[in-house]
Image (tube, rainbow, N blue to C red):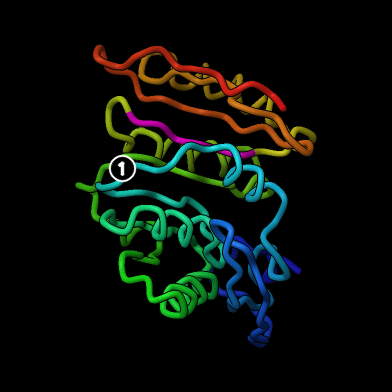
Amino acid sequence: MASEHYFSSSPGSELKLRTIHAKILGRDYELSTANGVFSPDRIDTGTQVLLGSVPAPPPGGNLLDLGCGWGPIALTLALESPHATVWAVDVNERALDLVRTNAAKLSITNVNAVLPDEVPPSIMFTTIWSNPPIRVGKNELHGLLQRWLPRLESGSDAWLVVQRNLGSDSLHRWLQGAFPEEFSFVRASTNKGYRVLRARRRTGLTSPIDIIREP
């Protein structure tokens, strides 16, 4: 049913909370998930690939988890960069409630779980990590990236994980065409059928992009 898509603003089914055990930064945690959100039973493979491929996030500034779901990326960012402000953004209000619950369980106080329009327009990001909602459709996905990538600070990186069979290479080509002057895009790594794409916002002071070799 359309109401049960994880990218719906308000899942139509009755809330059924569940508890899972998930490993974040090598430590096991007991976390809350629910029906009506993305990958409620575990940290999905794409997110695992992303978290295993990216360097440590910046120690400060504003960090964005775009399409946060129940929060594994946002929680990782917050634990790794306790002096930064992490913005966990999703259209699914149930998912945002779960992020807040899980942040409280981990005694994390630097996560803002918000709807897209609740991010102040003046905020720029020192990094963006995202397992974007590919299944929303090409037009919606492109609009999402056109909205948020320009809010990356100059010289900073965004990291996107996309399943190869769901169009990672075509998305890479589209990004290069949509942002030809402002960004550089490379395939940073490939693992378990997923591509990790790295976007760097250009600046004259930025060193060349280094490519992480495939395992």
Give residue 81's position: percent from left, percent from top.
35, 53
* In front of the other: 57 or 137: 57
- Quadrant containing the C terminus is top right
For disc 1, the marked residue is 125
**Residue drawn at 40 percent across, 20 percent down:** 183
Relative to 102, does residue 58 appear above or below in the rendering?
above
- Quadrant containing the N terminus is bottom right
Image side of residue 118 versus residue 51, left or right:
left
- Disc 1 element: strand
Stretch in magenta: 156-161
Relative to 1, does residue 170 appear above or below in the rendering?
above
Give residue 106's position: percent from left, percent from top.
45, 74
Q: Is residue 158 magenta?
A: yes
Relative to 78, does residue 166 appear above or below in the rendering?
above
Q: Give the image quarter of residue 31.
A: bottom right
Instruction: Report the amino acid beneath label 1.
Output: Phe
Q: Give the image quarter of residue 153.
A: top left
Question: What is the chief secondary structure element of the magenta stretch?
Answer: strand
**Residue drawn at 34 percent across, 65 percent down:** 112
Give residue 123's position: percent from left, percent from top.
24, 48
Give residue 16's position: percent from left, percent from top.
67, 86
Q: Is residue 48 magenta?
A: no
Image side of residue 169 versus residue 95, left or right:
right
* In front of the other: 106 or 98: 106
Furthest residue toward front: 26
